[in-house]
Image (spheres, helix red, strand yellow):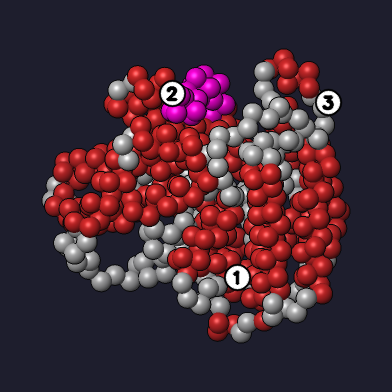
Amino acid sequence: MGEPAQTPFKTTGSQWLMPVSEYLGFPLDQVNFLACQLFALTAAFCFRLYLSPAHVSPLVRHFVAALLGISFLVFCFGWYSSHILAVVVANYLIIIKADLNNVHRYSMVISMGYLTACQVSRVFIFNYGILSTDFSGPLMIVTQKLTTLAFQLHDGMCKKTEQLTQEQKLMAINVRPSFIEYLSYNLNFLSVLVGPCSNYKEYIDFIEGRHISTRLKQQHASSNRQNGYNKTQDPSPLNAVCHKLVVCAGCMLFFLTITRSLPIKYNVDPDFVSQASFLTRLTYAFFSIQAARPKFYFAWTLADAVNNAAGYGFLGMDEHGKPSWDLISNLNIIGIETATSFKTFIDNWNIQTGIWLKTVCYDQAPKHRLALTFILSALWHGVYPGYYFTFLTAIPITIAARAIRRSIRHYFLGSRVMKLGYDILTWAATQLAICYTVMPFLLLAVNYTIVYYRSMYFHVHIISILAAVALHRKHKPREPTTTKTSSVSSSAPCSAQCQHVHSNNNDKD
C-alpha cells in the first residue's frame, strides 16, 4: 500500500456551517461535529431537567434521545448515515427473529463484517481518500453497542446462572428490547457521534430513573451498609461537568497552540529525515506524539461531560463521600501521562473499548482468549496497514518489558529513592516505547511507516527482541498471588480490571 491519495475533501453532511468553517480555518466535518456536541451538551441539561422520569414517561425519553441522535447523524454525514441506520435495523431483526442460542454470533458477524467492509472500501477502493465526512467512528461505536447487547441478551436468556460471572449476572438481559428501546440505546444523542459504549441495563436504568439509586444500592450492598441509599436527593452532576469542560478547554487550547505546530507527518519528511540527527528525530517524534493526544482527550472528555449533564454516568460515592461521575469515562489522563508500563497505559486509554473487548471476546471465548481478543481489536480499529504495524510492534515490546521488570524491579524496592529512580526510568522508557509503537497508527500507510522505522534504525524492535531473548529464563520467579487471577495478560488490549478503574496503577506493573 502506497502513500494516501491527496483526495479533495467533500462532505455529504450539512453545509450550513461552511462560513464558520472558512472563518475559523477548520474542516467542515470538525465544525459540524463540534456544533453537534455543544448542542448535545445543552440538550443534555434540558433532558435531565425538563424530560426527567418525574415529568415524562420512559417512552418519551427514548423517543427524544433517539430522534436527536439520528438528527446528528444526518447533519454530520448526510446519506452516509444510512450505513449506520441499516446495520442497527439489521441487528434488531436478528434480535427478534434469530435463534437466541446464536444471536450473539450472528450479531458479531453482521456488525463486524459491515464495519470491515466499510473500512476496506475506504482504504483499498478510495486509497485512503475521505470522500465524505468519515462515518466510521460512529459506526465503530454502534458496533460495540450492538454486539454488547447481543452477548448480554444471550447471557440472560440462554445461559444458566451458575455459568455467569458476577458481572455478567448484573448486566444480563432477560427480555428482548422493544424497537424504540433498541434505537435509543444505539443511537441516542449522548453517545452517537463519539461514544462511549455502555451497558444496555445501565442505560435503561438511566432512562427509567433508576440509574443513581441502583448504583448507590450496589455500592452500599458491597460495603455491607444498609438503607440510606434512596433517602437522599440525587447528586448533581454540575461540578463533574464543569470540571470536564475545563479539561476540554485546556485540550483545545493545547491543540490550537501546540499540536498544530507539531504535525505527525513531519516525522517522515524527506528533508527532516535526511538532515536531522537521530536525537533530533527522536525528540521530535516524542513531542509530536505527546501533542497528538489532546485531541482524543478533548473528544472523549466532552462526550463524557455530555452524558453526565443528562444525569448518566454516576459511578457512586468516593472515599470522601463525594459523587463520582466516571462510570463510562473513556480515559484517565493522569494515569496515561504518568504510566510506567504498557499495561498501565492501556488500562487508562480508551477504557470502554477495553471493557467491550473483555465482554464480547475474552470472557466468552472457550480457548485462545488472548489471541482472539487481539484479532478482534485489530479488526475493529480498521484495515489501515499502520494499525497492524502498531499491534505487531507491541508484542515484542510487551514481552521484553515484562521480562525486564521481573528481572530487575526487585532490586529497586529497597528504598524510596531507588524506587523513585526506577519509576522515572520506566516512565521515560514507556513513553518513548509508546511513541515508537503508536507512530504507524497515526501515519497509516506502509511507506510512511517504513520511512519512520528506518529513520529510527528499528532500535526499539532490536532492543526488545534482544532483551526478551536474553532475559527469558533469567527473571526472578513471581510469588503466587490471588489478586490478579481474573486479569487479562498484560499484553492484552484490555484488562479484566479495567472497568471503572481510574487510578494510577503504576506500582503494579
Callout 3, which amino acid? Trp
> Quarter of the image containing the N terminus?
top right
Relative to the observer, which residue lies in front, 221 or 350?
350
Residue 431 percent across, percent down from the top left = 35, 39
Tell me where residue 355 sits by quadrant. bottom right
Relative to the observer, which residue lies in front, 73 or 473?
473
What's the CA distance linking mark 3 and mark 2? 39 Å
Relative to the observer, which residue lies in front, 212 or 114?
114
Would you say the magenta stretch is mainly helix, strand or loop? helix
> Quarter of the image containing the C terminus?
bottom left
The question of residue 253 being in magenta is answered with yes
What's the CA distance linking mark 1 and mark 3? 45 Å
Q: Mark 2 sits on what residue?
A: 270
Answer with mark 1 or mark 2, whichever residue precedes in sequence: 1
Residues rendered magenta in the picture: 251-269
Q: Mark 3 sits on what residue?
A: 16
Q: Secondary structure at mark 1?
A: helix
Q: Nearer the viewer, mark 3 or mark 2?
A: 2
- Which residue sits at x=36%, y=22%? 274
- Which residue sits at x=67%, y=22%? 26
| Residue 103 position (above or below residue 197) | below
Q: Mark 1 sits on what residue?
A: 170
The question of residue 455 being in magenta is answered with no
Q: Nearer the viewer, mark 1 or mark 2?
A: 2
Kindly indicate whether the residue at mark 2 contacts the one at mark 1 (C-beta within 8 angstroms).
no
Residue 315 percent across, percent down from the top left = 56, 54
Horizontal side of 161 relative to 146 (left or right) equals: left
Q: Secondary structure at mark 2?
A: helix
Residue 270 percent across, percent down from the top left = 43, 23
Relative to the observer, which residue lies in front, 13 or 416?
13
